Amino acid sequence: GENVGLHLPTLSVQEGDNSIINCAYSNSASDYFIWYKQESGKGPQFIIDIRSNMDKRQGQRVTVLLNKTVKHLSLQIAATQPGDSAVYFCAENLSPGANNLFFGTGTRLTVIP
Amino acid sequence: EAGVAQSPRYKIIEKRQSVAFWCNPISGHATLYWYQQILGQGPKLLIQFQNNGVVDDSQLPKDRFSAERLKGVDSTLKIQPAKLEDSAVYLCASSPEGQPYNEQFFGPGTRLTVL
């Protein structure tokens, strides 16, 4: 399958700071991208998604940016809290319409109180 | 609303033994997925069901893995015989029908250790 990878495997931030987690993808045909959060011992939890006809989408304290020119996806978390500590995965839908996700390796975010 | 249920939560077996995992998706969700997540990696799709039919099983190692969803609700994933490299967390997810892209809701997973 196509490769969805992350630039940094770990990220440590101070509580209250903003976090930026990056992801690269290589399948230019992918038209839907999702960020998931996974806490230890739990399944992935949906955070935010974006379709390829958009370049930015905002949620509560989170923003996803999509740059199709360089095939780059980022997740920004504002005012990072200890509860944000987890592994974050980006995933792309390889088969438009089939809801078939390909996950990247993940970035571990650690929030320092 | 109850989430995706999986059992058991943990399983330890020896290589060449058999094991089965069970998943109960969110009520009304037509699509069910099984993923394999090896430590330090992202989940990898093994099989996708739409009701009781298989949509995609291209990454399922069919010589040892099998899955079924006979009544379009619960599903079981079986490994027979298990290998050391099958040690992983097996995640079940479900999503509703109706839109091209629907959020997948994940269960807590079953952690399998093959000795």
Image (tube, coloured by chain):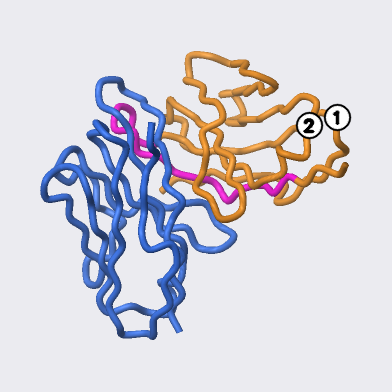
Chain colours: A orange, B blue
The residue closer to the viewer here, A26 or A113, is: A113
Chain letter for mark 2, please: A
Q: Quadrant of residue B102?
A: top left
Q: Quadrant of the N terminus of chain B?
A: top left
The residue closer to the viewer here, B99 or A45, is: A45
Residues shaded magenta: A94-109
What residue type is disc 1 on? Gly
Q: Quadrant of residue A15?
A: top right
Kindly state the secondary structure of the residue where label 2 is placed.
loop
C-beta proximity under 8 Å, tags 1 and 2:
yes
Q: How many marks?
A: 2
Q: Which residue is mark 2?
A: A80
Q: Is residue B52 left or right of residue B15?
A: left
Instruction: Residue B68 in the image: state x and y as whole percent.
Output: 17, 55
Instruction: Residue A74 in the image: state x and y as whole percent.
Output: 66, 30
What residue type is disc 2 on? Thr
Kindly state the secondary structure of the residue where label 1 is placed.
loop
Q: Which residue is mark 1?
A: A16
